[in-house]
Structure formats: C-alpha cells, structure tokens
Image (tube, rainbow, N blue to C red):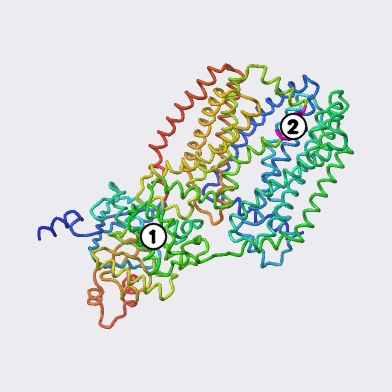
Amino acid sequence: MYIVTIVELCHGRGYMINIQNVTKTYGSGIKAVDGISLDINNGEIFGFLGPNGAGKTTTIKMITGILPTDEGDIIVDGHSITNESILAKMSIGYVSDDPNVFERLKGLEYLNFMADIYRVPAEGRKEKILTLADEFEMTSALNDKIQSYSHGMRQKIVVIGVLLHDPNVWILDEPLSGLDPKSSFKLKEIMRNHADKGNTVMFSTHVLEVAEKVCDRIAVINKGKILFVGTLEEMKSTMAKDTSLEKMFLEMTDDE
Amino acid sequence: MSNIFSIVKISLMTAVRGQVGKKRKIKSWMIGLLMLIWLGPMVFSFSTIIKVMYELFDSFGQGDALISIGLLVASMVVFMFGIFYTIGSYYMAKDIPTYLYMPVKSWELTSARFMIVLLYEYLTMLIFFLPIIIGYGIAAGMGVLYYIVSLVVFILLPILPLALASIIVMGIMSFAKHAMNKDRFTMIASLVGLGIGIGFNIGFQGLARSADNQEGLQELIMTGRISMAENIARYFPGLNNAAKALIDGNLLHLLIFIVIAAAGFALFMIVAKAIYFRGVIGINQQVSRRDFDTGKSSGFEAGSPIKTYLKKELKLIFRTPIFFMNLAMIDFLMPVMILVPMILTVGADEVVQLKKLVMDSNPEGLFVTASFILFVFISAMNGITATTISREGKQFQIMKFIPMSYKSQMDAKLLSGLLVSMMGMIITLLFIVIYLGISVPIAILMLLAGTNAVILTRISGFFIDASNPKLKWDNEVRAVKQNMNLLFNMLVGMGAGGIAVVFLIFVSQSLLINALVFILVMFAVNFGLYKLLENRFPKMLARVE
C-alpha cells in the first residue's frame, strides 16, 4: 500500500502522462488545443481519436516536447516536459507520423544512434537490436541504407529505434498507416505486451476498428477540445444501444 | 526549342518559390537589395586589390598578364563548380525522373539544365571575374571598346568550361548502372571528373609548350616577344583569343572566341543526345543487398551522445552527394586549386621573380593575416553550419524530442563543420608553407589565425541558419544550394575578410600587431560569439515550430 503511494507520488499521482489545462494557439490565432486536461494511466493503451485537424498531433507534439505549450504543463513519468525536459524525454519513445528518418544511414547505424542517444547500455544492446529486428522481420535489411526501404520498412525501423530503451511511455502518431497486415498485427501485439508490463502506450488514429480492438481507454478530441474520455463501454452506455463506434464517433464530432 | 524554355521556366520558378514564400516576399526583396548594396563595395574593394596587383605586375612589364590570370581563374572555377553543379542539376535533382516519362528529348532537357547552371556560374563570375575586368580596366586606362568586349567575354567565357565539365560528367555517369552504391559512385564521379579536367588542362598546356620548346619560350618571354599573358592563356582553349580581344581590342580574336564557345556547346549537345539518358536511368536504379549477417559484431558499440550525434552529422554530409559537393567539397577543392598552378609553374621564371619580390619584403605579418583572409573566405563557402538546421528538413522535430540538450546538439553540429574545414585548411596551409618556404613558427601563427577564421564562420553560419532555417524542402538541392543562409554567411566571411584586407593595407603590417589582432583578439571575439550563441540557441530553436 505504502509502496503504491510512493510510486503514485513520484509518477504524478499514478498517471504516466498528466496533461494539465494545456492550450496551444498557432500564429493565425486558431486554438489548435483549447485548455485540455487528461490523465493517462500506467499499464494502459490509450487511443487518441479525432477527425483531421482536431488537435491530435499538436497534443502529441506538446507531450513529446516538440512544441511548447502556451498555457499549462504536461508531466511525463513524474517530470515536467517544460522544466525537466531531458528527464521527461528519456521516458518517452516517440514514433512520428513521418517515418522518413536519416535516409543515408544504414538501418543498424540508425538503431545504434538511437541507442546511444537514449543511453542504452552496451551490454545486451546487440541482442536487443537483433531480437526486435527479428520480430519485425527487418534483420536482413539492417545493413542497407534506410533510403532503400519501403514506407512500411521505414516505419518498422523507427518503431524498433524507440523500443530499444524500453520506454515507460510509448507514443505513436498514426502508427498503423502503411503497415502490411502482418506487421500491423505484430505492432498491436507489441503494444499490448508493452502496456501489460506496466508501461503506457498512447497512440492517435483515424481507424476506429483499431481503437476498438486495442485500446483500454480512448479520448475523442475535436476542434482542440476533449469531447469524451473513458472506456468504449462507457462511451456506448451514453449512446443508443447497438450503435457502432463509427456512428458514435460521427455523432460526437458532428455536434461540435 | 519550346521544351527547353518550358523546362528553364519551371526550374527557375520552383527555385524562386522555394526560396521566397508569399509572406516573406517583401523581406526577400529587402535582402536582395541589401545584397546588391553589399556587392557594390565588394567588387569595388576587390577591384582596388587588382589595381594594386596590376601596378606590381606592370613594374616588370607584365601588367597584361592579369587579364590572362583572370580568364584562367574564372574558367577553372567555372569548370570545377561546373562538375558539381551539373551532377546535381542533370542527375541528382528530384524532378529529373519526372521528365523521363515525358516526351522530352535528352538534349532538350540537358540544354535547359545547362542554362540554369550557367546562371549560377554567372553569379560566381561576378565575384571571380568582374573585379579583374574593372580593376584592370581602370589601372590600364582602357576605353569603351574594352568594356563592350568585356561584356561579350563575360557572357561567353563560362560556356566552354561548363560544356567540358558537362561532357566529362555525362561520360562518367553513363557507367552509373553498374555501381552498387549510387551515392558513392556520384561522389567519386565528381572527383574523377575533376581529375580528368585538370589532366586535360595540363595536357593542353604541355601541347602548347612543346610547340615551341621550353627554353625557347623562356627566351621569348625574357625578350618580350611573347608576354606572360599569352603564356598563361595557353592553359585553356580560347583564352588567348579572349585575352587578345580584351587587351588589344582585336575583334577577329573575339570572333574566334565566339566560334570556340559555340563549338563547345554544340559538342555538348551531341554528347548529351548520345549518352545522357543512359546515365540518368542508371543512377535512379536503387540497389539493396539485404544480406545482414547476424554473426557480425561491429556496429553495436556504445558511444557518448555527442560523439554519436557528430558521427551522424558527418555521415550524412559525406554520404549525401548534394551536401558533400555543395558544402564540404570547397575545402578539398581549394588545395587542388592552389596545387595545380604550383605544379604548372614550377621553375617558371616569372613565378620565381614574383616569389622573390614577396619574400624580400618581410611579409610575416602579411602571412598571418593573409591566412586569416584566405580561410575566412574558403570556410565561409563551406556551408556545413550555415545550413545545419535547414538540412534537418522535415526531420527537424527529432532535434526537439530526443533527450539531448540543445547545447549538446549545437556543439556536435559546430564540431562537424569545424572538423571538415580544419581538415581542408591544414592541407591547404601545408602546400602554401612548403611552396613558399615559410618558417615553422610563422606557419603555426598562420594555423592559429586560420583556425580563428574557420571558427568565426562556423559560428556565424550557425547563428544565421538557426535564426531562420529553411525546413520546407523535398529536394536536397533546395536545402543547400537554394538556401540564402549559405549566401549570407559568405557575405559575413567576405565582410570579415574585407576588414582584414583594410587592416593590412591601412593599419599595420607588423608581425606582432597582426598576430595580436588576428590570433588573440579574434580568439576573444570567437569565444564571446560562442557564449552568445550558447545562450541564444535554445530560445531560437524553441521559436521554430
């Protein structure tokens, strides 16, 4: 009991990601994110849903430290992304929606670069890289430049890169687009395993079926505001019986 | 013909649009105006230097040699840049594959690209050739005809060297399909192209010399029957005619020069028609091995974040042909540019004379500052730090989300620029020191002054790029070649070099004072600038979204 309390204190009251009243306005005056607060728990897969331009990517970019917040703060694994950014970033593994990373590096060089930056110890590094590469069927391509990879292969090498340091918080922006069915299945499986170890997985998606199958909880965002946070069952209970997720989603985002 | 102009138009439009952007239009015009204002005094001060040099040369009756030197230097520079420009423009540009499935003939596409490259070459000529034309014109008191002929020569001069560079490049690139590593092939191709060009140059000169045997030539020069101007102009076809047209106003020679340029361009079109497409198709065939050996133990070693970041920077520069050729190559070209004339003129009487004249005038102070001036110019042309954030492009956000402080990333990036420039500087300096027989202590002072010059342009370049990086590009060429930041840093380098020239001419030539200013004071300035950058960079980076 005591141990749990201490851990909870250290980790922002037991939440792995704690978004506190965050706002982001772009130059044109449009509020991309409008005063949202969100807590994402340890050990859960959290889906971030919303139509195009809803504010998903902006929120993710603020969590990962790519964009500064205009108001509010975000605590990741007990560290403020604003004031203790390096510590917060060390806890995150981020897969952006654009997998075109350093194309002139070879796959292995990229992975070793990421391992150095995220301080992955030399001991066991090789095994880790090879195991992950094997899981994603990327081993034979490790010696080739990323330039020669297909879109899906690039996504896979980026995913492997962020998993090397076993991040407590794994954030993925539209991770499943461009992956073949087998890799997509594999990625979902790895996400589940990662969360089951007590880590947090957060990802944004347009694909509602994915959210339905994989997520423990979801948030629906539109026009910079959170419309719903909770489990799918909770969401269904607010709607008419037998409404599909798609219909619920459309109704919710149309109201705005 | 209309295809050629359409391609030229589209290429120019994309180049300009990438640079300007609607919001920044006014700002860009202002910058353009500022640059013009800046270019004026630059050309003027270079012209003044040329005038002084004319008087020096004229003191032993060889003033006209300056025109030949100018023609030769401009041709060589156009040729060398031409090798890299053409590889970039004919083969590496992202839009080239688009034309492959359009009904465009190979010679039309290459001719259009030739014209685009020619425009770049004219910009280069503004710096390398215009001051010589003006400086000589004023010093030798030339008339209106001279300036009219100059204009024609200015327009035609780059055509032949660029045609030769294109032909050599197309010849080498036609073997591209056999290469496994296309990037490495391209970079080696550029070096081989350069080598062939210089070999051709030496051969041409040897041919000209053997026509009248060596001793006879010396005698001809000594007795004044053949001038040094004529001798130098032999190094490149057509230059002798251009020199005669400029110096004597001989229009027949101008006509011959025009015919030679036209013949060069015609030959270029014939070669393009025959082999260009073969090379383009070859270079666009991706090859991958997929043969990783899990038993291999290298490639997994752990290193510090700064070291690994630095290695990443250097790998990307040295493996991306466009980056390497446009950013780092200049440091390695410079020793070649200095070495070639040295080899060509070893033992030549006029050079011995000139060397003696310089060495007799207690030039130690001059050497230290000259080293600063030379390397501030060269390193300013090396755009590694002046495009360092721009080169990140769409992947810029990686800088922000990795757990590495902005300062550490800044240090690694500065270091990458410093290392490449220092490598080139040491080689160049070594050639100069050995050639002129400069003593070791003075050589060390030159090294220190040169290092200060390199550090200065590394930091200024970083400042310029960090304050306004060009992140929106889909084509590496646009990240570096069509990036104003590189040009701004060149202007900074030229400004600093210009101030040093003024200091040397008007303030002091003493060794002590020059060493004090360009080693100690400059070091303090650099340190201050570094501290300022260290303080500003995180804020600058945070602003870029």
Q: Which chain carries label 1?
A: A
Check disc 2 and give the amino acid type: Thr
Mark 1 residue element: helix
Please state which of residues B126 and B303 is positioned toward the viewer in this rendering: B303
* Residue B30 appears in the rendering: no
Nearest-to-viewer mark from 2 and 1:
2
Assign the C terminus of chain A to one quadrant of the image. bottom left
- Residue bounds of the magenta highlight: B342-348
Is residue A234 magenta-colored? no
Q: Is residue B110 left or right of residue B512?
A: right
Please state which of residues A252 and A106 is positioned toward the viewer in this rendering: A106
* Residue lying furthest bottom: A242
User: Please, is residue B153 above or below residue B96 in the view?
Assistant: above
Whether pointer 2 and pointer 1 mark residues with C-beta atoms closer than 8 Å, the reply is no
Read off the residue under disc 1.
A161
Number of disc labels? 2
Read off the residue under disc 2.
B345
Q: Are marks 2 and 1 on the same chain?
A: no
User: Please, is residue A39 above or below residue B489 in the view?
Assistant: below
Q: How crowded is mark 1: few (under 14 residues within 10 Å), some or many (20 or more)?
A: many
Check disc 1 and give the amino acid type: Gly
* Residue B40 appears in the rendering: yes
x and y percentages locating residue B472 in the rendered image: 51, 53
x and y percentages locating residue B359 in the rendered image: 66, 20
Q: Which residue is drawn at 74% across and 22% down?
A: B353
Please state which of residues B297 and A104 is positioned toward the viewer in this rendering: B297
| Disc 2 to disc 1, C-alpha distance | 56 Å
Mark 2 residue element: helix
